[in-house]
Every structure is written in C-alpha cells, then in structure tokens.
Amino acid sequence: PIYGCSAQITVGGGGYQNLLHEAQELVIVLKEGALPASLKEATKTVIGPSLGKNSIHKGVTAMAIASIIVIAFMIIYYRVSGIMADIALIANILFILALLAMMGATLTMPGVAGLVLTIGMAVDSNVIIFERIKEELSQGRSAVVALHEGYKHAMTAVIDGNLTTFASGLVLYQFGTGPVKGFAVTLMIGI
C-alpha cells in the first residue's frame, strides 16, 4: 500500500538508452507483482520444536554410544596405545567443535553424522598405525624402532585415505544442498 496518496520512482542517471532499459525493467517488475496468481496449498508439514529436540537427542545419544564402543575397543585391544589414541580422539572432537563454534556453525543432524564418521576415520588411522607397529615388533625390532617404522610405513595409507575422504567432502560441499553441505563441512574439518 502507498500511504499519503503520493509516491515517486526515480530512475538512475546515464544516457537515454540506459534510462529506457532501467524503466523497462522496472515496468516488468511492477507488472509481475500485479499478476492475479493464486496460491494453492499442496501439502503442509508442521515441525515443532519437540521433533527437532527429539532428533538432536537421538543423534547425540547415537554419537555417545558409538564413541563409548570405540573407546572401549581401543583400550581393550591396544591397551596403553589405545588409551593414548582415545585421548587424541577426544581432543580431535573438541577441536572440531571449537572450530565449528568459531565459524558460527550450527551442529545439525548431518553435522553429527560427520562427527561420527570422523571418529571412525580417526580410529581407522590408529588401527592401521598400531597394526603396522605390531608387525615391526613381531619381526624382533625394538619398541622405538617399531614405533618409528610403524608410523613411517603406515602414514602413506593414512594420508591417502584422509585425502580421498577430504576430496569426497569437497565434492559433496560443491554439489550438495543444505544438509549435505553441513555433513561435508563437519567431515572436512574433522579430516
């Protein structure tokens, strides 16, 4: 509505052709706004805060259960090395959450899925390294040499796996929409 019974539209400056072009675009915009197009509601879905709260609760619960299982497995199977890996894993999750907070990102369900996948990737890397160290120890090498050689020989596999996962995250971010992008961002930060 135009209140006060008067209105004015000022067209920008420039040559005659520029003014004419700008006026024609303005006419199109004004005419499109006046089309008698009616809207018909095809479907209606109402999502209340309780549904979102329930989803978040289930996602956090799933992440907590997955984390506990992974932490327990690492401690039981790898003992002291597993405890150190678990400490690094917890630090990794805290760093991811800190980076997301610094970026002002909201942790959504796809983001929680990205965190869970990051936990899996971190454990996978640890298992590759620890198994390589075990191989070196079984060949009679000292603990220091086995540790050095285990990391040295396992790092190419770990880096390859993480780089390909990061590349997948880039593709998901580039071509995905909302939730897929949220998953990709969390995954790439985690990697």
Image (tube, rainbow, N blue to C red):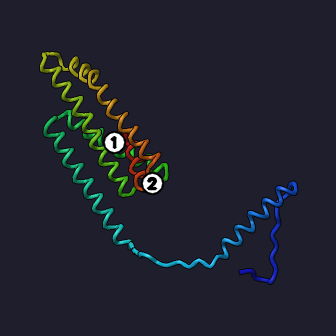
Foreground mark, 1 or 2? 2
Residue 166 quadrant = top left
Residue 57 locus on image (x, y percent): 30, 63
Residue 134 quadrant = top left
* Residue 146 against residue 23 in the figure, above or below: above
Q: Which structural element holds mark 2?
A: loop
Q: Nearer the viewer, residue 157 or 27?
A: 27
Residue type highlighted by circle 2? Thr
Q: Which quadrant, please, contains the C terminus?
A: top left
Q: Which structural element holds mark 1?
A: helix
Q: What residue is drawn where x is 45% and y is 51%?
A: 101
* Residue 68 against residue 7 in the figure, above or below: above
**Is 48 left, or right, of 144 in this rendering?**
right
Q: Residue 91: which numbered mark, if any?
A: 1
Residue 62 locus on image (x, y percent): 25, 56
**For the view shown, which residue lies furthest in the right direction?**
15
Tell me how far mark 1 sits from mark 2, CA to CA. 29 Å
Residue 135 quadrant = top left
Residue type highlighted by circle 1? Ala
Q: Nearer the viewer, residue 70 or 158?
A: 158
**Is 13 left, or right, of 110 in this rendering?**
right
**Is 176 left, or right, of 142 in this rendering?**
right
Q: Residues within 10 Å of mark 2 (few under 14, many from 20)?
A: few
Q: Residue 177: which numbered mark, if any?
A: 2
**Is 117 left, or right, of 101 in this rendering?**
left
Q: What residue is drawn where x is 39% and y is 57%?
A: 108
Residue 56 locus on image (x, y percent): 33, 62
